[in-house]
Amino acid sequence: MTVGLTHYLVLAAALFLVGMAGVLIRRNSLIMFMSIEIMLSAANLVFAAYSRLHGDLAGHVFVLMVFAVAAAEAAIGLAILVEIYRLRRSVNVDDLNTLME
Amino acid sequence: METILFYLFGGLMLGAAAMTVASRSAVAAAVWLVFSFVCAAGVFALLAAPFLAILQILIYAGAIMVLFLFVIMMLQGPVLPAEVAGRTVGRKVVLALPAAAIAVILISWAVRGREAAFGATPVTGTAAAVASLLLNRYLLAFELISIVLLVAIVGVMALGRKQEVLP
């Protein structure tokens, strides 16, 4: 059985599932960030797979856009995390409950 | 050959991503994620996207993950303490349910209909081909994304400077 579009879509869906489970289950915000990167990676795979299907390189351009957005998101997110750590001495999301109390 | 490489890279990528999520230590998670991104570069190469494969390693496995590791080392030393009083198994299952539901939707959508085979002669995404598209038809998006990056740099510098006491 040759590898076609469906294989890549299933791989991307499984990756997205792993990333989303990570965001939902883990409480260490650093690992939650990494799970978001996994989900972005799954989206990139779909872009590249459809680009291959249609023989159109526009998908590759949008993968580049996702790279840039991921870089910006990681930089700002980690800066916010460092600030939170300075204030609360923790990166555990369950410790960030000031609004709840 | 392509089938073997797809299952090799895809399986390793998925396994490494699962190990990222399952790792107790953030450093181990980051190293697994680097491995996952390197395998993603292999999958991009299979999809006739050599430029993306190179950028995946340069940007993701290089720049972004170095930033992650730098922050991990700066925050809590080489080993993060294990998550104290982790969630109970039942709670984890309940939290994973929405992920499972969306996964069922996504996979059933992905496998609907028959397999769309790729064309025999791929349009290879070389640096020259992607760049000519990026700097002609998608020039506006290219400029806007550079503004996003500029805003990100300014935002990080604003967040990272020494805190002043508000009046």
Image (cartoon, coloured by chain):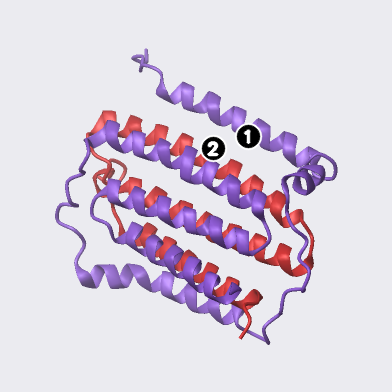
Chain colours: A red, B purple
Q: Position of residue B72 (x, y in %)?
A: 30, 38
Neighbour class for label 1 at 10 Å: few (<14), some, many (≥20)? some
Tell me which residue sits at (61%, 86%) in the image: A1
**B116 is higher (above) or lower (below) than B166:** below
Q: Which mark is residue A72?
A: 2
Q: To which quarter of the image does residue B95 belong?
A: bottom left
Tell me which residue sits at (54%, 70%) in the image: B5
**B18 is higher (above) or lower (below) than B150:** below
Kindly identify the amino acid type of the residue bearing the numbered disc 2. Answer: Ala
**Residue highlighted by disc 1:** B148
Q: Give the left or right position of residue B156, taking residue A5 as reference.
A: left
Q: Give the left or right position of residue B76, taking residue A32 as reference.
A: left
Tell me which residue sits at (52%, 46%) in the image: B57
What whole-number distance in Å separates the C-alpha atoms at marks 2 and 1?
Answer: 7 Å
Q: Position of residue A46 (x, y in %)?
A: 62, 64
Q: Secondary structure at mark 2?
A: helix
Q: Which quadrant is home to the N terminus of chain B?
A: bottom right
Kindly identify the amino acid type of the residue bearing the numbered disc 1. Answer: Val
**B26 is higher (above) or lower (below) than B113:** above
Q: Chain of mark 2?
A: A
Count of marks, rendered view: 2
Q: Position of residue A44 (x, y in %)?
A: 60, 57
Q: Which quadrant is home to the C terminus of chain B?
A: top left
Q: Give the left or right position of residue B78, taking residue B151 as reference.
A: left
Q: To which quarter of the image does residue A18 belong?
A: bottom left
Tell me which residue sits at (47%, 45%) in the image: B61
Relative depth, front residue between B96 and B44: B44
Q: Mark 2 touching mark 1, by CB under 8 A?
A: yes
Q: Chain of mark 1?
A: B
**A27 is higher (above) or lower (below) than A74:** below
The answer as to whether the residues below labels 2 and 1 share one chain is no
Neighbour class for label 2 at 10 Å: few (<14), some, many (≥20)? many
